[in-house]
Image: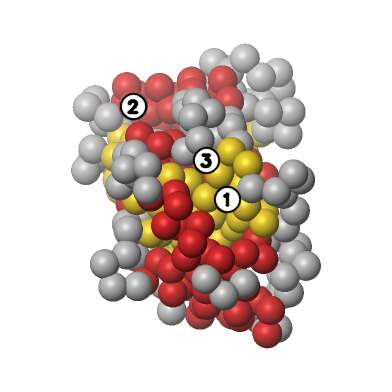
């Protein structure tokens, strides 16, 4: 079974995948993967089902902060099924002094075949060999739209990859961890909200507001892993709708821990307007 890590923690030798729920989740993970690669001096090879005009350099995905300097290369995905084609492409990408190679392939849906088919197995095997060869400086990330695959397919995906990746944490100081949510959109808060971590929470809520798209009218705050929250922190959570620039925003407090539930009742904020409370199961 694949183990989980943040995309920013990927290393050479990793053959990873993400089964994403929304386009926003895919874009966030891809942008981080490519951006980190360019900053590290890696070449990025994007394997796609059709590459008009043949092999070509392409601009990095939005949000990577990179320039079109040939470090991001688009190649047809079937190069992975043509003998030494993938190995040759990796060799060519590293001849310019690049310190590593990052492969990525989108397969949702794909004419290369779905989990359980020979074409799918052959393609994934080629990526696996490239990433895990002795002394490899290659990592590979496969992207799958979860909406296209059933439970049995997802189990096959997990079995074909050594790593399952997620989006990077927005903040983690060892006391509070703030992780993006995509379905529904929002934030997961783990650890403690106190005087030391409140500024990070305020900043994360502000940044979320700036990134909010048309479908992000509501904000889900998952509190299941929250161990402590002081009064100022609680006020910040329940006022996240009032301080937002998004009109008629509803704040969903999901999986409210007992300590926060008691504070809501004691403060009289349990009926705050614009806040929906979902108790922990």
The local secondary structure at tag 1 comes to strand
How many residues crowd around disc 1 within 10 Å: few (fewer than 14), some, or many (20 or more)? many
Q: CA–CA distance between discs 3 and 2?
A: 33 Å
Q: Are marks 1 and 2 in contact (CB under 8 Å)?
A: no
Q: Earlier in the sequence, mark 3 or mark 1?
A: 1
Q: Residue 167, image x and y in percent?
A: 47, 47
Q: CA–CA distance between discs 1 and 2?
A: 34 Å
Is there any visible trace of residue 271 in the rendered image? no
Residue 200's disc number: 2
Q: Nearer the viewer, mark 1 or mark 2?
A: 1
Taking the spot 43% from the left edge, 79% from the top edge, the residue there is 1
Taking the spot 60% from the left edge, 79% from the top edge, the residue there is 122
- Side of 42 where 254 appears, left or right: right
Taking the spot 74% from the left edge, 44% from the top edge, the residue there is 53
The local secondary structure at tag 2 comes to helix
Depth check: 214 or 53 in front? 53
Q: Is residue 2 above or below residue 144?
A: below
Q: CA–CA distance between discs 3 and 1?
A: 7 Å
Residue 213's disc number: none
Residue highlighted by disc 3? 72
Q: Earlier in the sequence, mark 3 or mark 2?
A: 3
How many residues crowd around disc 2 within 10 Å: few (fewer than 14), some, or many (20 or more)? some
Residue highlighted by disc 1? 46
């Amino acid at each position: 079974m694949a183990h989980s890590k943040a995309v920013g923690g990927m290393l050479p030798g990793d053959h990873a995948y993400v089964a994403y729920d929304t386009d926003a989740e895919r874009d966030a993970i891809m942008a981080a993967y490519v951006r980190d690669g360019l900053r590290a001096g890696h070449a990025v090879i994007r394997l796609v089902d059709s590459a008009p005009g043949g092999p070509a350099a392409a601009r990095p995905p939005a949000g990577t902060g990179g320039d079109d300097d040939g470090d991001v290369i688009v190649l047809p995905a079937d190069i992975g099924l043509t003998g030494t084609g993938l190995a040759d492409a990796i060799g060519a990408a590293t001849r310019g002094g690049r310190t590593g190679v990052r492969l990525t392939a989108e397969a949702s849906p794909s004419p290369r075949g779905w989990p359980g088919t020979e074409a799918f197995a052959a393609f994934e095997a080629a990526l696996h060999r490239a990433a895990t060869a002795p002394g490899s400086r290659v990592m590979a990330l496969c992207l799958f739209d979860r909406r296209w695959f059933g439970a049995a397919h997802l189990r096959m995906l997990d079995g074909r990859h050594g790593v399952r990746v997620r989006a990077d944490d927005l903040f983690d100081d060892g006391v509070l961890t703030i992780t993006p949510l995509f379905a529904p959109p929002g934030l997961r808060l783990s650890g403690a909200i106190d005087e030391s971590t409140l500024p990070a929470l305020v900043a994360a809520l502000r940044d979320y507001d700036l990134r909010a798209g048309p479908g992000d009218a509501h904000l889900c705050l998952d509190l299941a892993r929250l161990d402590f929250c002081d009064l100022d922190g609680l006020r910040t959570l329940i006022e996240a709708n009032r301080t937002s620039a998004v009109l008629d925003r509803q704040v969903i407090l999901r999986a409210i821990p007992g300590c926060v539930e008691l504070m809501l009742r004691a403060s009289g904020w349990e009926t705050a307007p614009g806040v929906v409370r979902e108790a922990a199961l």
